[in-house]
Amino acid sequence: MGTTANDMKLLCVNSQWPPMMDATFTGTEKIETAAATAMAAVQRAEQAPKPELHPSSGLGAWLKETSGSLAFSTYQSSRLFFLFADENGQTVAQERIVGSAMGLAINENALWISNKEQVWRFSNVGPLTIKDQPWQAVYMPRKGYFLGGCDTHDIIPHVTFKGRGYELAFVNTNYSCLAAVDAHYGFQPIWKPEFITALSPEDRCHLNGVGARDGELAYATLCGRFDTPIGWKAVKNGGGCVVDIRSDEVLCEGLSMPHSPRWHQGRLWLLNSGDGDFGYFDGDRFVPMTLCPGFARGLTFVGDYAVIGLSRLRENTFATGMAIKGRLESLNILQRCGLIVVDLRTGKIVHWLNIRGVVSELYDVAFLPGITRPYTPGFSEPDLHRQIMHPMPNIFPIALPRPRSNAETAPAKTSQETGQ
């Protein structure tokens, strides 16, 4: 895993859907390793061309109005992005390579980010000035769990389930269960669908999404009710369902690759990804609200707005049997990778971010309320990592290192050079 702090600017050009604006973005160059298991992926991501980000003309102004910022993950290209607005309402992004980034969870104190085999906690160490730039919140990597081959998807920190609290719960897709991080073992299973007879790394039902309600795990999405290895792939169109995991009640069936169950404003919202719909539940019925111009994964809310992550369909058998591809083609709508902002009062897409180039798939998106200038070094910038300490006042005084003299820094002479 790695990242860099060097900045770069990407030229944003006009797009056919809809017109775009120029924006300033930050990127990655130098890679330093934080976990050997992710080195190959990081090196590939570094060598690949940089992605192009094309925001709508009003996205920066909207972000400024929210008094917050967005984070989103791109597991297919190992990236984490922060998206925010500068003082002029221009859209700005910061990009870091952190491995195959999947689930995100973030608040003012911490950022949790998972990949297929690991999960990391980044702590907000407060406002700092870094390279003459002031940052409101700086997220530093502080703790990691190595989960093994779980194919981790959604994550929720500091949550309860059936009266017990968990530091972090996550969707263990490979083992067809919900699990929690464990200080000793790879993971601790905490729930499985009733039809799953045994936990086995076979991705039987493609359990992918989890949502909480009032601080308790409440809803899960899966793509097919099968108890056989990769059984769900036979019913990608119409085989999915939503389960209330508190009672094991199936709330709705007949969905297509559902993702991201989220409770907001007294409703359960959902991405019915295979059909291309964003909508909500009315009783046991899913009500589509907005057609998404891409395969939707990742959902967060900002007041009366939903922010949704979009991916372009893979050019392989993944899209076989899903309705979204034909729906978009029949309407002459190009598939998009990026973000859309939907007004919940009208169902209309009001702002967007298109991504082109090496990034073609997103997984998750999160909102950072009250934080308008977030920063993270990822796993690089060792000088920054060394200077962040928690001194105890009047007990352990802290001093900056003194400049070393030329004599101290000069290499030691050999005995041959000294004549001894």
Image: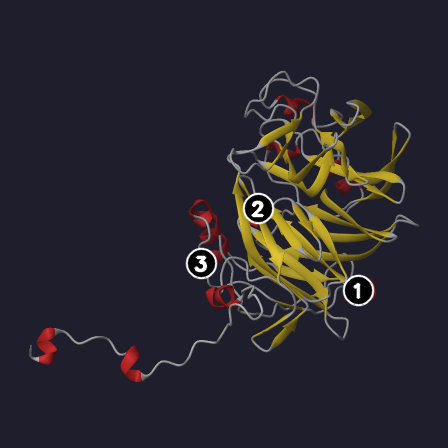
Of label 3 and label 1, which has the lower sequence position?
Answer: 3
Identify the amino acid type marked 2: Gln
Query: What residue sits 62% from the left and 75% below the top?
Result: 133
Most extreme residue toward the front, as rendered?
Answer: 395
Q: Which residue is mark 3?
A: 32
Extreme-left residue of the structure:
420
**Camera-nearest residue between 403 and 268:** 403
Kind of residue at badge 3: Glu
Q: Is residue 271 left or right of residue 171?
A: right
Q: Residues within 10 Å of mark 1 (few under 14, many from 20)?
A: some
Marks 1 and 2 sit apart, C-alpha to C-alpha, by 30 Å
Tell me the SS state at disc 2. helix
Find disc 1 in the rendering and name its residue: 67
Within-10-Å neighbours for mark 3: few <14, some 14–19, many 20+? some
Task: Return the x and y of residue 380 as percentages of the image width and height.
Answer: 49, 61
Q: Quadrant of the C terminus?
A: bottom left
Q: Find residue 84 and report its horizontal and vertical position in percent.
A: 71, 64
Q: What residue would you read off at disc 2?
A: 76
Q: Nearer the viewer, mark 1 or mark 2?
A: 1
Where disc 3 sits, the SS reads loop
Question: Of the residues shown, which amino acid type is indicated by label 1?
Answer: Ser
Q: Position of residue 121 (x, y in %)?
A: 59, 50
In the rendered view, tell whether residue 189 sits above or below residue 21: above
